[in-house]
Each structure stands twice: as C-alpha cells, then as structure tokens.
Image (cartoon, rainbow, N blue to C red):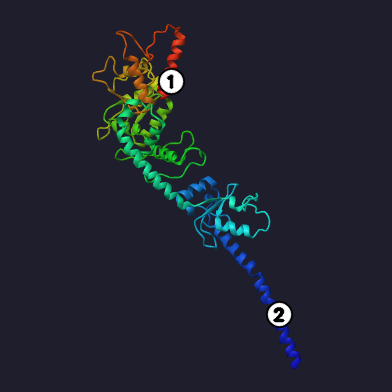
Amino acid sequence: LPSTSATLFERIAETVEQAEYNLMRNMPVVETEKRNMKNIQRASDVPEDVQSMSAFETLQALRCNESENTWCPICMGPLGSGGETGETGVVSLTNCGHLFCKSCLAEYAASRESSVPCPNCRKPLGPMNKLIQVDPALTRDDEVLDDKLRQEAKEFIKKASAMLELSNGQLEPQMWEKLFLSIDLPANVNRRGEARFTAIPSEVVQHFRAATGMESLGCRAGEAPSGSTGGGTCVGFSSKVVALVNDIPRHERSVVVASSRHGVAHLSHCFGVQSIGHRSLFVGQNPTKSETAVQEWKNSKTDGDGDLECPVLLIQAGAAASGLTLTDSCKIFLLEPLLSWEEERQVYARCHRYGQTRSVEVKCYYTPVSVESRLLEWRRRSTANKQPGENVLYKRISPGNEKEEESEDETEMDSDQTLFLLGL
C-alpha cells in the first residue's frame, strides 16, 4: 500500500506539472484570443461612417485633432491609441493607403516570419522603415505658421488697399495669396479638406464652406444653401444677396434683375428663406404664367403692418422685353452689371416710361476687384472718348489707327475685352 500511494502521488505530480507546462505554453494563445474578443467587441462599437472613411478623410480627421473619429483595423481603437501597448500618437500609413497605429502594426509585423502583408488588403507592405509615419501633434507648428502668415498678410493688405482699387484685379500672384490669407474664417467652419477634390488646398475649401454655407463642394445641382431669418442674417448667402435683402423695401413694389435664369432661381430661394413675397419672370417662361406673375405683383395687397404681400418682381434680363410696363415700381435693383448698356437701358425703360409719376432709382451691386468691376471699368474706358451722338457699346481701349476690315477689328476687340475682363 505505501508503494502504491507513492506511485499515485508521483503520477499526480507529473500530471499537474504537465498541465502547468501546457497552460504556460498556451498562455500567449489565451491572451491573444482574449485580445481578439475585446477587439471584436470594440469593432462593433465603431460607427459605420468611421469604418468607411477613406485615407484622405482619416488624415483630415487626424489633422483636426479628431482621432476619436478614426479607427485602427488591428486594435479597433482610435488611431494612435496604441492598442494594448499604450503607445500613443504616431500613425503608420502603408503604401497601399491604409492607416494603423504604429505600435499595432509593429507588433503585427513582428509576429510574421516572412513577408508582411497589409492587414486590410493583404498586399506586401515592404520594409517597415519605408512606411510613412504620421504624427498629428506636428500640425500645431503649421497652425502657428499660418497665424503668423495671416497677421503679416493683414498688415500688407492695409497698405495695399489703394492698389487693389486701382488695379481692377490685375495683381501679382503673391498679392492674391496675401489677400486670401488676410481673410479670417469663422470658428464653426469644418476644417477638413474635400475628399473628392484633394488638389484643392483645405484652406480654400474652408472659405468655400464659410461663403456658401454648404458642407460639401460636391453638392448636387439645385441643392439650396442654408439660411436663417432675423436681424438681416443670411447664413450661406453672398454679401450681394445680404445687401439686396436688406435694401428691398417691404412697403412698396420693386424690380430685381438677374442676368441668368440660375440667378433668378437662386434669388427666389433666398427670398423664400427671408419670407419676401415675389413673382418671377424668366426667358422661356409660358406667356400666360408671365402675365399672371406680373398681374399678381401689381395687385398685391398690404398686410396689417403696411407691408405688401408680394413686393418684388424678379426678372431675368432677357425677359424684360419691349412692351412690358412696370411703372408700378420706381426702384430697380441689378444683381450684377449686365453685359451691355443696351440691356440695362431696356430694363430701366420698363419703369422709366410714360405713366411713371415718380423718380426712378436704380441700384447695381458688383464685387470689387472682380470681373464685374473690370466690366464697369471697360465701359468707362470705352465711352471716355465717345463723340456726341455716337452710340458706342464697346470700343477698343488702346488707340489704334490701323485700317482693318470690320470683322477682323471686331474679333480683336472681343479678344481685348475678354483678356481685360479676366484680368490677363
């Protein structure tokens, strides 16, 4: 019996020792599976829009210090969180365009004996020291530099305001850059670039967003800008439209003219946002609808506050044809200078004609240092030497005595005009 007990004890001890050995040998597997289970659980918490982000969008999020809106496909946590290692900050970008925590990718590569495939697409990664390392913290230096450049640009623009006015937009490239840098962006503008237009600097994209109120540059045709009422505030409206909305009287009738049908559609939406009653006329409109629109505008009644229900008639320039009488209004607003004086005079004649009992006021909006201001300057120069009784629409700016055929002269004049309007 004693020998039997001793043998049994030895066997039990051997079994325990073997079990401990097997347990120790499989502990890495157990830990790995535990980590995998944790990663699977974390992956289920990652929003679908974050998982579907492109490399460009992910880099933009890191640049904006929004690492919580990114994820590492290895540890399933935010990029730069380091997974289980706890090493934070640096992110690795592979040659196939996928992003991982640097420490996670290093641990993954160390577990492979031969060539290391990308955890996402299985393409060979190549030498690990050739990967691009991204440190989001370094963007702070760029922000300090941007602030310095913007401050220098503002000081420069103050000294060059007269140059801007006199040059009609024909400025040196560095001048345009300083003008661009001098403009401050609102604090609530999305600072990311645009994934579909990666060649456009993110600063330019941000200015587009601030000016239009549109989140994406790839918006669909007909998509409306955002707007808000109250106190003359028009979020997403251009400075022209804001000025126009504030200038339009609500207690009397007025005519607003845009050069294109797109301009009419845009203003119609803006007026709707601001609760300004209006009717529209545009080229190609059904004649019956055009006549109805004019009659409804003329017969508009006042409300309890003395404001007209429909104070504005919105017209596309070509739709203001002869025979249209708008003497019910003595105020005309032009959204931009029209292409020719004749077009503008035709618009004026709709209100300033027989039957008008009041002085007609005309206001034209234009953007300084732009094609609009250069169009006005071209007109001024073209008519500077106009002879009495001469009806000049456009005239060459540079004097010339060459006797050329009329068609060739007109072609050269059109070329000169185009180059001047484009600031070339």
Above/below status of 85 relative to 137: below
Q: Secondary structure at mark 1?
A: helix
Q: Which image quadrant: the C terminus? A: top left
Residue at the image position 39 percent from the left and 8 percent from the top: 401
Report the residue marked by disc 1: 418
Report the residue marked by disc 2: 15
Q: Nearer the viewer, residue 68 or 247?
A: 68
Furthest residue toward front:
129
The three-letter code of the residue at mark 1 reads: Thr
Residue at the image position 43 percent from the left and 36 percent from the top: 224
The three-letter code of the residue at mark 2 reads: Thr
Q: Which image quadrant: the N terminus? A: bottom right
Above/below status of 218 relative to 5: above
Task: Where is residue 288? Give x, y as percent.
Answer: 42, 21
- Left or right of 112: which side holds 269? left
Of pointers 2 and 1, the one earlier in the residue sequence: 2
Task: Where is residue 368? Give x, y as percent.
Answer: 34, 28
Q: Specify the quadrant of the image occupied by residue 35.
A: bottom right
Q: Nearer the viewer, residue 66 or 267?
A: 66
